[in-house]
Amino acid sequence: MANTTVDPHDQWFSSALGGLVTGSGMWYHGILAGFTRVGGYLGGTWTPPAESDGPGCVGDGSWPALIGRIEAVALRAAAPSTRPERREALLALLELWADTVFADPTARIRVGDARAEATAVRDARGATIATSWPRDGRCGVLQVWTGDAAPPEFGGPVEWVDAPRGWGDAGQLRRLVETVRARGPMPWRADAGGRLAEATGVSRAASALLLIGNAGGINTLPRMEPDERRELGLGAAELEAGFDELRRLTEIDRLEVFAGVLPDDPADLWEPTGPDALAERIGAAWVARFGRTIPVPEETLAVLAELDHVTLHTPAAQICGAFLAPDTHPLSSVDHDPWLAEGLGGVYCTSEEQGVRWFEEFLKSLSGALPVIYAELPAGDPVRAGLPALLEELRARFDHPGLLLGAGYTARMRDSVDRLRELFGDRPYVGPIPLTTATFDDGLTIASIAEPTERHPDPSTRLYFRPAYYTDDERSTLLREVASGGAYTRDVVDLIRGDWSRRAADRIADGALPVGGYECDPAVAAPETVARVAKALSVDTDAAALYLQILVLERPSDRRVRRWNGWNAARHKRAVAALETAGVVVADKRARAGRGIFLPGDWARATHKWLWPMEMWKARLLGVQVIGDRVWGRHTWRLTLPELFAHAWEVVERGDGPA
């Protein structure tokens, strides 16, 4: 039965319930009318019309997860940051929910999955309804009764699961709605968020979101309007980092973490101790479900969170967490034994647990995170201090014989079975799941090629490799030669095992910098080179240090330079003026540069947000790929920054500098 009834509140449910239900595009129409029919049918007060045999589906059918977990909805309805139109929609839903059997603690409720043979059945004992549309001949079902005998059912046998029961009886729901309408939203106290952050280890932004019943999962942009986040005292970037931190929670996680956190009398939320008590209960629920993490310094989190190419794969807080506790964090301390399975378009790497996918995504994030943590965090920062130990843990993971990672695809991508057999031998890959796709396994590399289909008309060639056997032997040389694109994970294995990572880790472990000093600041990282530059250019050490930064660093924006060097604007301005007087830089305004002085010569622009524009001379120095006048890659790290500062100045001294 289609939900066509229009209610002005319906348009707000997709955003108001974001992260708590799935199928956000299906929560715009007929929501309150649908719940009215469901409640009426289960309670015996509504009978379907002749053309229908049940109440129909509401939204995408994921709403039964709210039964016994309605507190997240109630908390959002009371939160001070919730926009008025969304608040009214949530209050209307809670009022309606209070009139259903879901708010009756004596009702017996269970959910399951059944053959889609009907949409509803009811008798004097109770009722069973379909809660979702059929998929592959099956649908979600929900059953309600109050007596000893179970009600009729359809599509059996059904593996029933009792729905949780907890806070949210009719009286509590009505009391909360009445209090919000009489007194306005509950009070906000930032210090309560601070206590929640301290108790759980999550960031200030994530704790603020938890206190308003928002544990992430909202995919619409903007996730919050400016007035909503200002109510919480959060900046736009900080808010995004908070959502990113919580993004790996499931919908059930986001409901369960709020189960049991509201007081028996909802009006207690408005008492002076209400915010503190709420923070304490949410903190206890969070720790019970996820454990307590080591807090990440907010300044550190901000540095990582602004890098979209890093946080695309792994939340910044998770990355930092692995550096803080590399020997215990699940991203770095757990060995994995994945295998190959078949899907649309070819084979893929899988496992019974989610961790193997997150591990590979973490490795991809490290290609951008490792250099930033080494270079752009100060000495003494706990995340930076954990880099040497993290690298050791990851090298141990790579030595595990059962680890299998993606290695991209072959140079032509449409290679033939005969060619792959010639390269990798006749032996097929053997795993726990038999494959119909042709595979060739030389012990290090597994090559697979899927036959064309109507949906995928070209053969799909994919490569996988076992890092434990990836060395300098003939098989490894072959893999490096054959793999063309998509070899991101293999490149990270090379990076982590490589000489640059070891030398960077040694500098951190040896305490080469004073506490608070940055590797990006040549005045502390390469003072001898700074002295040579100052003498040659007849400038002071501030100007010499700035010149080296403009020569070498990918993103020497004014904001970053001042942070690294500990300068105020006036000191920075004096250094800029000295370089202009020396004639070694040119003043200009260029898109996305964030600075006002540049090396002379051609400029390479960057149109992708994950790449940075720079001087052509610098791109050649850093090994950054440039096609035409556009940047197509990032710095290939082979030298530590002190080495790179010295090398760049040597290039200038011999007459090959920018011009």
Image (cartoon, rainbow, N blue to C red):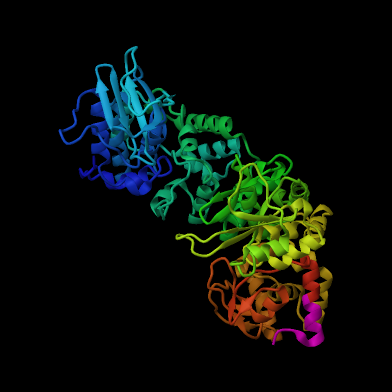
Image side of residue 512 versus residue 465, left or right: right
The range drawn in magenta is 648-659
Examine the rendered structure and indicate whether residue 231 appears above or below residue 555.
above
Is residue 655 rendered magenta in the image? yes
Q: Which quarter of the picture shows residue 289? A: top right
Q: Which quarter of the rendering shows the C terminus?
A: bottom right
Whole-percent x, y for residue 604 in the image:
60, 79
Residue at image location 48% in from the left, 41% down from the top: 215
Relative depth, front residue between 148 and 342: 342
Main secondary-structure element of the magenta-colored stretch: helix
Q: Residue at the spot x=62%, y=76% of the render?
A: 614
> Which sits in the foreground, 362 or 280?
362
Q: Quadrant of residue 580?
A: bottom right
- Residue extending farthest to the top is 148
Which of the image's four quarters has the N terminus? top left
Q: Residue furthest left?
A: 50
Measuring from the top left, give residue 335's x and y in whole percent: 71, 42
Residue 523 falls inside the magenta stretch: no
| Residue 433 in picture, x, y percent from top left | 61, 43
Residue 533 % position (x, y): 79, 78
